[in-house]
Image: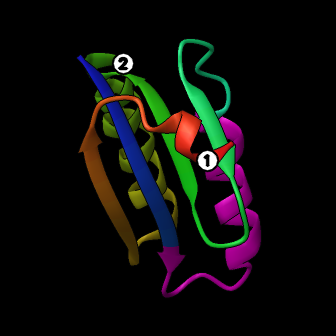
Amino acid sequence: MQLSVEISLYPLQFEDFESEVWEFIKRIRTYSELRIVTNGMSSQIFGEYDAVMACLNKELKITFERTGTQIFVCKFLAGDRSSVNE
């Protein structure tokens, strides 16, 4: 099953929040089995359900451990909605 996720990261107590957002984006872009699209407001992740969820499970935990207090806002939609963004 394919999955589409839109995710935004808002570090609340992190002095250099922009670098932490970019660090998260760089890490999720290393997953070659996923398609990542970013813009000024969010990142979209497209791929096989288990691969997307494994990525999010690992990378959200890393971010929580690195930054302490932050908010992730996520929207999950079954199916590959990547063609909608083109």
Q: Which one is nearer the viewer's eye here, 65 or 79?
A: 79
* Percent coordinates x, y for residue 53 in the rendering: 29, 31
The residue depicted at 71 percent of the width and 61 percent of the height is: 39
The residue depicted at 32 percent of the width and 25 percent of the height is: 54
- Which quadrant: the C terminus? top right
CA–CA distance in space, label 1 to label 2:
21 Å
* Percent coordinates x, y for residue 76 in the rendering: 27, 49
Position of residue 23 relative to residue 35, above or below, is: below
Is residue 66 located in the magenta-colored stretch of the structure?
A: no
> In the orientation shown, which residue stands out farthest toward the top?
33
Question: Could you say whether the residue bearing mark 1 is in a helix, strand or loop?
Answer: helix
Please name the amino acid that badge 1 sits on. Asn
Q: Residues within 10 Å of mark 1 (few under 14, many from 20)?
A: few
Q: Residues within 10 Å of mark 2 (few under 14, many from 20)?
A: some
Question: What range is drawn magenta here?
Answer: 10-28
Left or right: residue 12 versus residue 61 is: right
Q: Which one is nearer the viewer's eye here, 56 or 34?
A: 34
Image disc number at residue 39: none
Image disc number at residue 85: 1
The residue depicted at 54 percent of the width and 22 percent of the height is: 34
Q: Which residue is mark 2?
A: 51
Is residue 19 located in the magenta-colored stretch of the structure?
A: yes
Question: Could you say whether the residue bearing mark 2 is in a helix, strand or loop?
Answer: helix
